[in-house]
Image (spheres, rainbow, N blue to C red):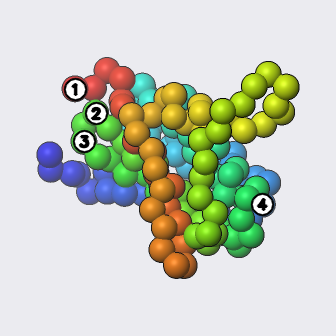
């Protein structure tokens, strides 16, 4: 697939603030709408909100970086980069009395795949989403 210039990876750096999760959601939605990928908006919003919130909650990172990348006509990758390389995301099993810990289970449920790559200076959590209605 030849990637049009308008579909090159899009990047946004966000500060460590409570408004960063909604800002990340709006950024991802704007990119996906610009690419005409309306069938993945809801899942992408859920995923980027969870990944950015986790980065802000569980690390002392001063900023997070959000990247939206077109993998193919039918797939998109969301990446969240933070400066907390020592903390690894853990998919937990939770029960009814637990008040949290379900976020990565939701990410796992709506994505084709997800994972984490880390270096000494940062980690990248990525999630691949299928775009409904695109082959």
Residue 135 marker: 1
Residues packed near mark 4 inside 10 Å, few (<14), some (14 to 19) or many (20 plus): few
Residues packed near mark 3 inside 10 Å, few (<14), some (14 to 19) or many (20 plus): some
Instruction: Answer with left or right where residue 7 lies relative to residue 110.
Output: left
Q: Could you tell me which secondary element the residue under label 4 belongs to?
A: loop
Residue 27 marker: none
Asked if the residues shown at circle 4 and circle 3 are in contact, with their CB atoms under 8 angstroms apart, the answer is no
Asked if the residues shown at circle 2 and circle 1 are in contact, with their CB atoms under 8 angstroms apart, the answer is yes
Q: Could you tell me which secondary element the residue under label 1 belongs to?
A: loop
Q: Residue at x 36, y 23 (%)?
A: 132
Marks 4 and 3, Cα distance to the nearest angstrom?
32 Å
Q: Is residue 48 above or below residue 120?
A: above
Residues packed near mark 2 inside 10 Å, few (<14), some (14 to 19) or many (20 plus): some
Asked if the residues shown at circle 3 and circle 2 are in contact, with their CB atoms under 8 angstroms apart, the answer is yes
Marks 2 and 4, Cα distance to the nearest angstrom?
33 Å
Instruction: Answer with left or right where residue 53 lies relative to residue 131.
Output: right
Taking depth in this image into account, of 100 and 132 the one nearest to the observer is: 100
Q: Position of residue 101 (x, y in %)?
A: 72, 38
Q: Earlier in the sequence, mark 1 or mark 3?
A: 3
Residue 74 marker: 2
Q: Could you tell me which secondary element the residue under label 3 belongs to?
A: strand
Residue 50 quadrant: top right
Asked if the residues shown at circle 4 and circle 1 are in contact, with their CB atoms under 8 angstroms apart, the answer is no
Q: Position of residue 114 (x, y in %)?
A: 45, 44
Q: Residue at x 83, y 33 (%)?
A: 99
Q: Position of residue 65 (x, y in %)?
A: 56, 63
Quadrant for the C terminus, please. top left
Q: Earlier in the sequence, mark 4 or mark 1?
A: 4
Residue 17 marker: 4
Q: Could you tell me which secondary element the residue under label 2 belongs to?
A: loop
Marks 2 and 1, Cα distance to the nearest angstrom?
6 Å
Residue 72 marker: 3
């Amino acid at each position: 697939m030849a990637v049009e210039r308008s579909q090159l990876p899009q990047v946004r750096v966000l500060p460590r603030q409570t408004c960063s999760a909604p800002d990340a959601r709006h950024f991802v939605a704007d990119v996906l709408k610009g690419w005409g990928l309306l069938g993945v908006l809801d899942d992408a919003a859920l995923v980027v909100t969870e990944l950015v919130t986790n980065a802000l909650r569980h690390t002392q990172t001063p900023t997070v970086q959000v990247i939206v990348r077109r993998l193919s006509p039918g797939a998109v990758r969301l990446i969240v980069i933070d400066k907390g390389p020592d903390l690894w995301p853990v998919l937990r099993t939770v029960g009814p009395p637990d008040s949290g810990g379900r976020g990565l289970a939701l990410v796992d449920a709506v994505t084709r795949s997800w994972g984490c790559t880390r270096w000494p200076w940062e980690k990248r959590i990525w999630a691949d989403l299928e775009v409904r209605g695109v082959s």
